[in-house]
Amino acid sequence: MMMLLLLLLLLLLLLLLMVMMVVVMMVVVMMVMMVVMMMVVVMMVVVMMVMMMVMMMMMMMMTMTMMTTMTMVVIGVPSFADIRTQFLCPSNMV
């Protein structure tokens, strides 16, 4: 009788150990999944930030080039016209 009780206790302990192991494994898996999800979210946020920065830089470059070209045209056209007229008809010089 005592032997049977001991065996039952051992079986119960083994079952408890198995359940504990499964629970621990589940918790570890959950933790790992949480960490991985956090990493993925952080990576996504970083990628979004980098993309936004690149887009802003591109927009700034485009606006700067547009402004410079516009100023060049505004400044360059009259002087260019003057030079052309002077070259074409030197009588304007007099």
Image (cartoon, helix red, strand yellow):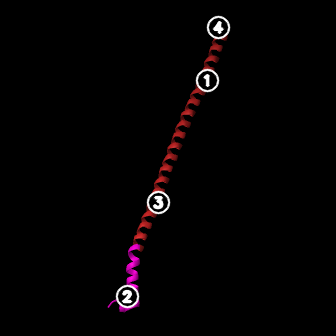
Label 4 Cα neighbours within 10 Å, binned few <14 / some 14-19 / many ≥20: few
Say which residue label 3 marks: 59
Q: Which residues are magenta?
A: 74-94
Crowd class of label 3 (few under 14; some 14 to 19; many from 20; radius 10 Å): few
* Mark earlier in primary sequence (4, 1): 4
Question: Compared to 91, does 50 lie above or below?
Answer: above
Q: Amino acid at mark 2?
A: Gln
Residue carrying label 4:
2
State yes or no: residue 71 in magenta. no
Spatial separation of the CA atoms under disc 4 and disc 1:
25 Å
Q: CA distance from mark 3 to mark 4?
A: 84 Å
Which of the marked residues, 3 or 4, is nearer the chain's N terminus? 4
Callout 1: SS: helix
Q: Earlier along the polypeptide chain: callout 1 or callout 2?
A: 1
Which circle's residue, 1 or 3, is located before the other in the chain? 1
Distance from the alpha carbon under mark 2 to that under mark 3? 40 Å
Q: Residues within 10 Å of mark 2 (few under 14, many from 20)?
A: few
Question: What's the residue type where badge 3 is placed?
Answer: Met
For the residues bearing labels 3 and 4, Cβ distance under 8 angstroms? no
26 to 45, vertically: above or below: above
- Give SS at disc 3: helix
Query: In what element is the residue under mark 4?
Result: helix
